[in-house]
Image (spheres, grey):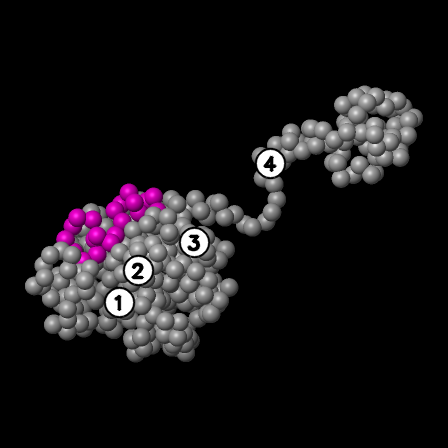
Amino acid sequence: MREVKIGTRLIGETKSCFIIAEAGVNHNGSLDLAKKMIDVAKDAGADAVKFQTFKAENVLTKNAKKAGYQKSDGDYEESQYEMIKKLELKKEDFKELSDYAGEKNIVFLSSPFDMESVDMLYELDVPAFKIPSGEITNLPFLRHIAKKKKPIILSTGMAKLGEVEEAVNIIKNEGVEDIVILHCVTDYPAYPEEANLNVLRTLRYAFGFPVGFSDHTLSLVIPAVAFSLGACVVEKHFTLDRNLPGPDHRASLEPGELKRMIDFIRETEKALGDGIKRPTIKEEEIKKLVRKSIVAKSYIPRGAVIRGDMLAIKRPGTGIEPRYIGFIVGRKAKQDIEKDELVLTEKIE
């Protein structure tokens, strides 16, 4: 399986899970809130914090309708354009956020939604481009990003396998092989029964690139399960407060929940181990107590030929293992062996 380098981190099946805390537009257009979100992501233990970069006039028409989840604030008169416009950040804001993330030693990422934003993020020298699910069939957009020759994280919400294949081929045709493919269910929030985590295996088998999961459920456990199924990257929306106004807050984790989710993933990493079947250090000690050895069933005098009925198998496990009993039977006792005494190699001829 190929490995992909983002910043100083290698992403692959044998590497630690790369966790992206998705701030998205939950800063509500405030640079101060955006910085606080970077602090929260870092404190929670995320590897990266990700925003969204766009110019509303480049992304949607002024009469585009809101999605159902975007109407949850109750402002039904506001258009999607008006809502998105309020959530824009300026180029200098992203520069400041990128620098601030660098000071906090957390990877800065942002999903571009238009070509102008791609160019701006390239100027900021982002370590990778995250392509949002809604752009997976926007082939000119994918080609424009791929020409930047940066690693690409491709989200696949709403897509069929053929559409993923087409997007991957467009990217590869521009000479980019550093691709991470994220399974995603584009619903806010998505139900756990919609997660379909076995798609991770499908994507890994179909394309041979590292895979991950962009999770829109509110579950704290599903991301850890995704990791156990091979997700090298996990992305999750978070907010400072789920009650804040805005389209994505109610489908996002609050700071304490984000930290618990990351802790679950890290605990899962430790639990999965390296796959080599061997006893632990503690088991080596316990083994001496709970396994059994060959012992004298009754007193065996020196010079006696040892028969099977002279032997028993009992704890502790510090002597000759029971599987070697055939090696003992028929040999002579080199010295007296008392009842219940371990029959050791130095005691037989």
SS under mark 4: helix
Which residue sits at x=47%, y=70%? 206
Classify mark 2: residues with Cα within 10 Å, few (<14), some (14-19) or many (20+): many
- Measured as percent of width and height from the top left, residue 11 is found at 44, 59
Q: Earlier in the sequence, mark 3 or mark 2?
A: 2
In the rendered image, which residue does mark 1 sit on? 112
Q: Is residue 105 left or right of residue 69?
A: right
Residue 267 part of the magenta segment: no
Q: Earlier in the sequence, mark 4 or mark 1?
A: 1
Classify mark 3: residues with Cα within 10 Å, few (<14), some (14-19) or many (20+): many
Q: Is residue 40 left or right of residue 314?
A: left
In the rendered image, which residue does mark 4 sit on? 283
SS under mark 2: strand
| Vertical position of residue 211 compared to residue 21: above or below | below
Task: Locate the C terminus and report the quarter of the image it occupies.
Answer: top right
Q: Earlier in the sequence, mark 3 or mark 1?
A: 1
Distance from the alpha carbon under mark 4 to that under mark 1: 51 Å
Amino acid under label 4? Glu
